[in-house]
Amino acid sequence: MPRTTPTFSRREVLRAGGLGAATLALGISAPETAGAASPSDGSFGLGVASGSPRPDSMVLWTRLTRDPLAPDGHGGMPLRSYGVHWEVATDPELEHVVRRGHALAQPELAHSVHPKVTGLRPGTEYFYRFRSGTTSSTVGRFRTLPAAPAVPDTFTVGVVSCQAWYHGHFTAHRHLAAEPELDLVVFGGDYVYEYGITAANLWRQGVSVAPEHAAEVQTLEQYRLRYALTKSDPHLQSLHARVPAVAIWDDHEVQNNYVGGRSAYGLPDEIFAHRVAVAYRAFYEHLPVDLEALPDGPGSDITTGFDVGHLARFSLLDTRQHRDPVPETAEEQADPARTMLGRAQERWVEERLVDSPAAWNVVASGVVLMPVTEDRTDQWDGYPAARARLLDAMARSSGVVVLSGDIHHAVAGELRADVDDPGAGNVGVELICTSVASDGDGAPTDDYAPDWLQHDYVRLYDGRRGYLTVTLTPQEMTSTFVSVPWVEADDTAPREVLARFVTPAGTSRLVEA
Amino acid sequence: MPVPSSQRPRQVTGLRAEPAIARTELSWRSLGFDPLIDHYRVHAVRGARRPFEPDGANLVGKTVYPQLTHHVDPRGETWTYRIVPVSDAGRTARASDALVASSVASVVGTGLPVATIGDFDARTLEHRFAPAGYAQIPAAYPDAVVELEQGVDSPADAWPYLLPGPGDAWAGRKAYTARWRLALPGAPAADHDLAIWLVDTTRLGGTLRVAVNGAALADVALPPGGTRGSREGDATVPGTALVRSYHELPVPVGLLREGENTIELVLADGGWVAWDAVGLFARR
């Protein structure tokens, strides 16, 4: 049976800042003799995950813990390395194993492992699990992507964002994990929040947290602890086990409203960089991301893309790390030189859009693209020239779908080629998923509604919690906005369909279904 | 096969201290990102005691940054400090060399309080609309003047936790005035001190113009703050993003008089300030 062997480009090895290349390699794959595992080595209390889907490979993830919420961020694990076995099979009982391997769970990476399973068949369902000593993880499932030029009949994506654990139960994840058709979940940003958890903001009823959670998250041990708290949720674990995940970040993975390498709260950039570095590291440690996302100090590359055969092309953007500062004047805001993505990423997504062979071109953005009001400078509204360039690239593409989040509201809208020209044609649609829990129960409408509903291209506005599913076929896209009536009291709220839109292929319209 | 691990962090060097009112500003050379530093532990003991061994009992703070503000007794204190870095793998280095540093005594600790608005406790909570009701301030003070009469009004009724400034669009971009009227039983015989402690300011910083009985006392330059003081009222929470600042001004004896005195604080430019407390102190 083939074993996966890690290979690293010189760039990847050089980028492994803070981690020796061997350390890094062993976190992905290792000889079976490396590390010593005993029956009591650790358990899988934070679940399993798969991600970075490709036609022939998948990244698996888990993190060994004994006490996931140990205050030092090491999950109760002794500060030594442990061996972790993994296996991938074609059946849920794992009787027909097609790949297996071994990785080292090391304290440098909070005992997380990211084995990359290669040599898989495209468009094929697999099952996987980890084992440490005599302890086995839950069984996870994934389906590899179809290989080009295949066009699958259908591909369904779940979209979630803004998981403020303390604001409510992850009922949305419970329902999303139970959706009958689901191939992938996109985490659209704010996977964790950095705020201290106190009586003032602990709206998730029936739980309590230890005093160490009250402090604002700043150190690596605190970020690790916050991820552990978030990932201790059983519904989030179920979702990760059900389908592969891809993730982009917004601001709260580091600090509210940070911009590029700059804090919104007055710290000098060279000082703030220390916090960025540990926050980016913790992101890598807790998500099933590829080696490219391993940070080099205060820099990381999470921009990624993949194709679902010739049905869809996904481009996942980093709209936080490379952006210009918040504008101080209207003139600065309108400056054509301002960038949201940075030049390299901007060129990258433009090429992917324009040269795409896919029927649908899905772009994930951490912040809202559509124009709302000029004072929303944290969104693309603060970068109008950069938005115009992106819209121009979208106009030269087809079947453009923007997925975003951040605002804790469900919004659907059509994207005009020229935001200042009401007669301009559409270049795509934007589907903004609401929060999983952030801001608690929410309400159908609120004081912000007029800002959005003043625009005739906005088709939906709702302020309750939930998620979004997007089903792509060669003929049409169906976007379904799901809400849950409450999240603060418990996790029993029912699934309610808020709105459903159909977008026929070759159009950029949202037709209510 | 030997199990590799990231290297042990280096010892912290370059530890230095900046004395300040009621605190000591510590900083040291960053150890960079290889290995990644989880955080620095700051250990300290009272007095000039070098060396001492760092342990859990003398841990006064953890920080991811190569700097820490150590808030101490406002009467002024001397402490001895050592820094221990902790790597991503939980490995530590030998503690830094010890450094002895003293804070600057505050009039809040050394003076006799004549009159105060609020408690000098790093919290805004006793003030009107605290900790997050700033949006009510413009309607409550349409002429942009806040007034408190000592002995008659309370901070909870008459002294909003924020004083807005021209940089605050939400408050009409006005230079708000905070007017404090206090009666003295007799003419002071010596200089006094005015203590203005702030829990936070905005990134704009600003200028707080201070006058006593109509005479200009000082233009206080306000440092950029954390901007979170409009929503959070307790700067003692570990890891808080609030940036406290302390301003203490001598008040010449000739500016004060028997009977009613008026101290005016005008936020002439910049963004809001979040009050911790304001106090007039006689010298011992």
Image (cartoon, coloured by chain):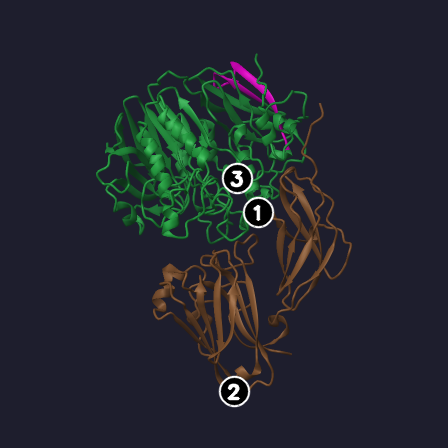
Discs 3/1, front: 1
User: Marks 3/1: CA distance?
Assistant: 25 Å
Name the amino acid type tagged 3: Tyr
Discs 2/3, front: 2
Q: In terms of secondary structure, what is the magenta stretch mainly?
A: strand
- Colour used to depict chain B in the structure image: brown
Above or below residue A453? Residue B19 is below
Residue at 37% in and 16% down: A150
Which mark is first along the chain, 1 or 3?
3
Question: Could you say whether the residue bearing mark 1 is in a helix, strand or loop?
Answer: helix
User: Marks 2/3: CA distance?
Assistant: 61 Å
Of all chains in the rendering, the one displayed in green is: A
User: Which residue is under mark 1?
Assistant: A270
Residue at 52% in and 85% down: B257
In the rendered image, residue A132, in percent from the top left (x then y), is placed at 61, 26
User: Which residue is under mark 2?
Assistant: B258
Q: Chain of mark 1?
A: A
Q: How many residues crowd mark 2 within 10 Å: few (<14), some (14–19), many (20+)?
A: few
Q: Are marks 2 and 3 on the same chain?
A: no
Name the amino acid type tagged 1: Glu
Judge whether residue A463 can be spotted in this image: yes
Discs 2/1, front: 1
How many numbered marks are there? 3
User: Which residue is under mark 3?
Assistant: A227
What range is drawn magenta here? A86-106
Question: Could you say whether the residue bearing mark 3 is in a helix, strand or loop?
Answer: helix
